[in-house]
Image: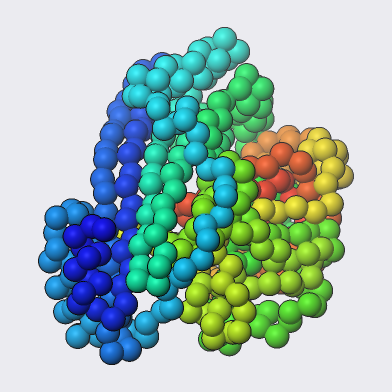
Amino acid sequence: MGKIFELASKNFQEAELYIKSEKKLSIRLSGDQPKGGDGSRITEYALRAVKNNNMGTAVTTSEEDISIVERAEISLANQTTVPVKFSNSTPASVCCEDSTVSNMKSEELLEEGLRISKLFAEVAPNIKPEISLTAVTKNIAIQNTAGFNANYNKTLYNVGVSTKSPKGFNEVYHVKNSSSFQPITGEDVEKLISMHKIAQNRVKGIGGKLPVIFSGKAMGSLILRVLAGVNSDIILKGISPVKDKMGEQVFSQNITIRDDGTFKGGLGTCAFDDEGTPGQNTLVYENGVLRSYLADISSATKLGINPTGNSFKRTMFSEDIEDHPSVEASNIIVEGLTVADDELFKEVKRGIFVESVMGAHTGNINAGDYSLNVSSGYLIEDGKLVGKVQDTMVAGNIYEDFKNVVSMGTELQPLMAIFFSLGYSPNVLFKDISVVVE
């Protein structure tokens, strides 16, 4: 038993110590030229302590810093926080660690970056890619006075490759996020180069109600709004559009959405969440029918349901030790009526392909509204991409637009939203969405 937890156990009626150890390596290249890199190791501690039906918190970066206990006492005395019930569950058995990533050295990251650069040089020597690679190894541990005492290791691997426009802006971007090593392949590079060449034809003035294919990456901005609707804290506040719609058909029958903390190799896969609830596979929407909310221990208790393993130290903009655990996604998985990705595009006579967006955090997220600048999008004509659209936005409400899901592809991509990946989704075709000329 560590000094901090031992002292906290004596000073408080209940206590929980959360420990996160992290080793991070990253490197950036422009073409075959290294442009920077970084490496760090840190261990952080977060204490939650309960006394007289009130809860205090404090953090530190040293296991010798027993002043964290005193600071938790001060926090408890100067604020009123309803205490949560600490977990004593059994962790899930998951696969979220890859020795290739955990043993990776800076030299190997650089070698992988140079390999990617060489793939470009062999196919399109005039296109110089921007490459970023990151390898992270974490250990998450929780010990509390309810009897929970467990830890698990996880790895994270991220590789991003982009090309530049003649004016120096990002043109095409490809990303892979996983807990396992996922190399960029020759096929990936060929697709990037093909998209880059198509993007040189600029298209303006595209607007109206059109068929729209959202890439798996861009779907993250829409899923952010789906998550708000099934967030148990939002349900309890009575401001979710689906607060009284359990078991009802909310979206198209062609889409299923689940949150899977046990997804093999997933970026958000976990043996337990940041409160000690085991990772689990929660069916949120089944063929468009609402089946479950996502809940932490506190909100689950109030709603009379079981916690779903979705309490994490994360906000829309941060992932810091100071963040209080709150309801967030582990791995959202988007599934449904699938066709080959080539066939998906052939279904569109004239529409747009939204590859990436800006403004995911804007608008009334809880109500499902969105108004997104298309940072990278393409005009589709007769099933083919013919040029990159400019000065274009997509706008609407997910509770209307998700009723118009036609089908989706098969290749899972990271769901990108602000600074984090929410899980994985294929390309998704919507029958029509409002496309606005800026």
Whether residue 234 can be seen here: no
The colour scheme is rainbow
Give 304 or 206, whichever is nearer the viewer.
304
Give 12 or 65, whichever is nearer the viewer.
12
How many marks overall? 0
Answer left or right for 316 relative to 388. left
Quadrant containing the N terminus in the rendered view: bottom left
Answer left or right for 84 relative to 271. left
Question: Where is residue 230 shown, x and y percent of the image?
Answer: 62, 73
Q: Dividing the picture into quarters, in which one does residue 6 lie?
A: bottom left
The structure residue drawn at horizontal position 42% and vertical position 64%, both measured from the top left corner, is 148
The vertical placement of 27 against 254, above or below, is above
Question: Where is residue 292 shown, x and y percent of the image?
Answer: 68, 72
Answer left or right for 295 relative to 380. left
Question: Where is residue 157 shown, x and y percent of the image?
Answer: 47, 36
The structure residue drawn at horizontal position 14% and vertical position 59%, both measured from the top left corner, is 65
Question: Where is residue 311 shown, x and y percent of the image?
Answer: 48, 66
Give 87 or 137, whichever is nearer the viewer.
87
Q: Dividing the picture into quarters, in which one does residue 232 lie?
A: bottom right
The vertical placement of 265 against 99, above or below, is below
The structure residue drawn at horizontal position 35% and vertical position 19%, both measured from the top left corner, is 107
Whether residue 411 can be seen here: yes
Quadrant containing the C terminus in the rendered view: bottom right
The structure residue drawn at horizontal position 51% and vertical position 66%, both measured from the top left corner, is 89
Q: Dividing the picture into quarters, in which one does residue 413 lie?
A: top right
